[in-house]
Image (cartoon, coloured by chain):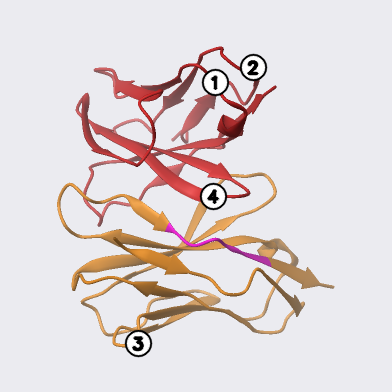
Chain colours: A orange, B red
Amino acid sequence: AQTVTQSQPEMSVQEAETVTLSCTYDTSESDYYLFWYKQPPSRQMILVIRQEAYKQQNATENRFSVNFQKAAKSFSLKISDSQLGDAAMYFCAYRSARSGNEKLTFGTGTRLTIIP
Amino acid sequence: KAGVTQTPRYLIKTRGQQVTLSCSPISGHRSVSWYQQTPGQGLQFLFEYFSETQRNKGNFPGRFSGRQFSNSRSEMNVSTLELGDSALYLCASSLSPGPSFEQFFGPGTRLTVL
């Protein structure tokens, strides 16, 4: 079974600064997807960024980028120029590419606070 | 395009009762997944439906069940409620079950069991 570990329950960053959230995972599969989801206090889970395991290039979405290290099974999220609206719970998630097993497996989350 | 809608948003039940939660996916989406979110266990997969068929099921007791209708709307049912069933239940829809298809989440139903 796959597992996802987020070792930082809480993080804080000054507005406009850069912060990196950590995530490691364990799997025996070679083909899979990794995601970062954001859950603000309003509860609606929003996809921030995704990475396909077979792609070596790290995914980037505006101020959000990942550092994907497949051999180390590490998938960190970097948020640049942090904004107050970035305050939320961030969940790292794994999804197998194997048909019939495409459920999301989530980490325990990191609560990100933005300091004005 | 309207997002995923879940009804009701809040629900209070007592132990032993049963409850039905509803999820309407984004128009055109045929795959619906359910997740339970609790402070202690985090986010856990319940089940996934596609074309009215359950494709995948998480590790939950048989008290948790679901179904999907021909219009892709889905319901989940919890019978004989226990205190530990208090949670935020999230529904997510996607065009198709494959991992390349993004899952869009609804706002959730907050269930409190007294």
Q: Earlier in the sequence, mark 1 or mark 4?
A: 4
Same chain for the residues at labels 4 and 2, yes or no? yes
From the viewer's side, name the closer residue of B88 and B94: B88
Report the mark closest to the observer, 1 or 2. 1
Instruction: Identify residue for label 1.
Output: B81
Which residue is farthest top?
Answer: B17
Label of residue B41 in the image: 4
The answer to which image quadrant residue B31 occupies is top left
- On the rendered image, what quadrant is the N terminus of chain B found in? top left
Mark 4 and mark 2: Cα distance apart in space = 21 Å
Same-chain check, marks 1 and 2: yes
Q: Are marks 2 and 3 on the same chain?
A: no
Which secondary structure lies at badge 4?
Answer: loop
The amino acid type, in three-letter code, at marker 4 is Gln
Discs 1 and 3 share one subunit: no
Locate residue B33, reporting x and y percent: 36, 38
Numbered range of the magenta stretch:
A106-111
Q: Which residue is mark 3?
A: A72
Q: To which residue does mark 2 refer?
A: B13
